[in-house]
Image (tube, rainbow, N blue to C red):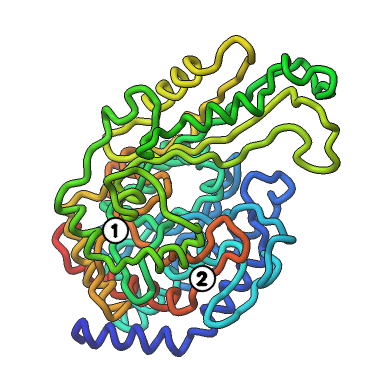
Amino acid sequence: MGRQDDSDRIHDFLTARRQEVVEGLIGWIRLRSVAGLPERGPELIRSANWLAGMLRETGFPRVEVWKVEGAPAVYAEWCEAPGAPTVLIYSHHDVRAAKDEQWEETPPFEPAVRDGYVYGRGASDAKGQVLSHVWGIRAHLAATGRDAPAVNLKFLVEGEEETGSAHLADLLEQNRTKLAADLVVFSDTLTWRQDHPAVCTSLRGMIGAELQVYGPLRDVHSGTVSGPAPNPAIELAGLLGSLLDDKGRITLPGFYDDVLEPSAERRAELAALPFTDEDWLARSETRSISGEAGYTVLEQLWTRPAVEVISLVSGDAVGASRAAVPAVATANLSIRTVAGQKAATVADQLRRWVAERLDGRVDYDLTVSEETAQEPYETPADLPALEALSAAMEDGFGKAPGRMGNAGGGPAELLSRMLDAPVMFFGIGLPEDRWHDSDERVAIQMLVNGAATLGSLWRRLGDLDRV
């Protein structure tokens, strides 16, 4: 059988089982595997066992649920292709918390199908991505008639990604031999558009911080002290307002010293993607476009660092106002880093910047989460597997893919460093899938096209002398 025959068979197989794919995802979404909430611990265990069952049904001869301090991880292996590459698939089964009252299409854990989408928490990030892998393997076997995949496959699907993968490094260290691979396929990313896929080749890093500013020793009636009393909300607001200069550049001392400029080739790759301001604003729901001067939207997203205020709380945020000057104001920051930057260096820059700008009128406490920081990662440009993925995406989507990056963070650099293997990205999420927000969704056709891509990828990788 030729590759085109295989591709046709893969699509026929998945088209015939489209409803089964959807029903499987719906069943998994119903499990409230929310990261970071102790009361959801049993649901995380059920989620891991649910996936383990799916992998066993697919044919994996070895499937294990690993007990991890934070949340269980699922490991599986199917290594029956002597001489072929070994590929480790990484993703996660935990999801973000959801506020029921903010969801309009369906309650977050009561998934619904509407207009070609599955709605529910985790539909795209990242249970749908994991299920595309499962169905991609099934399609690969059905199309080729093989008893085992054309490459040696391993799965590692963790349960702490949404809270920073705090125990992943220990997990990798303890299981280096078992997890050894020639290539890591990282599936917790986006592609560009349903009608124009793109190979992701980079991932920004991430470091988080919490800043608490203290004013009065307790909340004090504003009519008593207003004027001479320090207001931590005003002090914090002024500080945050100076995070960026009038060109949209981050003002931390020395912040750009290590930032690498995007190459002319990279800028050309991004410029080749179909883009209009109107399309971006509609799909991202971001109202307007701002950011660092001198760079396009896509260059800002994928090649430039950024800082965001994730939360800002002070005073009577909920309920009736007491008309008091608050004692504390708190902000949570997320800093996205790029090639050349190191989380430890950025953490020191942030500490110096805060110390220089807050005077003695207020006190403060800055906590930088270096233990869960993630470094940026770029897939090696000469990796043969990239061309195999490009060809497989053309098989899966019916269109030659472009090249892109991913604006979020993830443990790609950690996986590459600890397993001594290159990382290649493949995801089926779209900017309009509303990750971490209300009414998260995934396009059913993306589930199918993603599975078709992966079904084609395993044979293509199996034909390579090296990945």
419 sits to left or right of 288: left
In this rendering, would 443 be left or right of 191? right
Left or right of 35, for residue 228:
right
In the depicted view, which residue is nearer to us: 47 or 313? 313
Single out the mark in the foreground, 2 or 1: 1
* Quadrant hosting residue 22: bottom right
Residue drawn at (64%, 15%) of the image:
362
Q: Which residue is mark 1?
A: 404
Where residue 156 appears, x then y in whole percent? 45, 53
Label 2 environment density (alpha carbons within 10 Å; few <14, some 14–19, many ≥20): many
Circle 1 packing at 10 Å, graded few (<14), some (14-19), many (20+), is many
Quarter holding the C terminus? bottom left
For badge 2, the amino acid type reads: Val
- Residue 45 visible within the image: no
Name the residue: 37% across, 70% down.
193
Residue 442 pos. (x, y %)? 51, 70
Foreground residue, 60 or 431? Answer: 431
Amino acid type, mark 1 = Met
Residue farthest toward the top in the current orientation of the protein: 360
Classify 404 as above or below 446: above
In the picture, the disc for residue 442 is 2
Q: Nearer the viewer, residue 424 or 301?
A: 301
Q: Is residue 181 visible?
A: yes
SS category of the residue bearing label 1: strand
Compared with residue 167, is residue 394 higher up or lower down, i.e. above or below?
Answer: below
Q: In the figure, residue 271 lies in which quadrant? A: bottom left
Residue shown at 30%/31% (left/top)? Answer: 256
Discs 2, 1 touching: Cβ within 8 Å: no
Which of disc 1 and disc 2 is earlier in sequence?
1
Question: Callout 2: helix, strand or loop?
Answer: strand
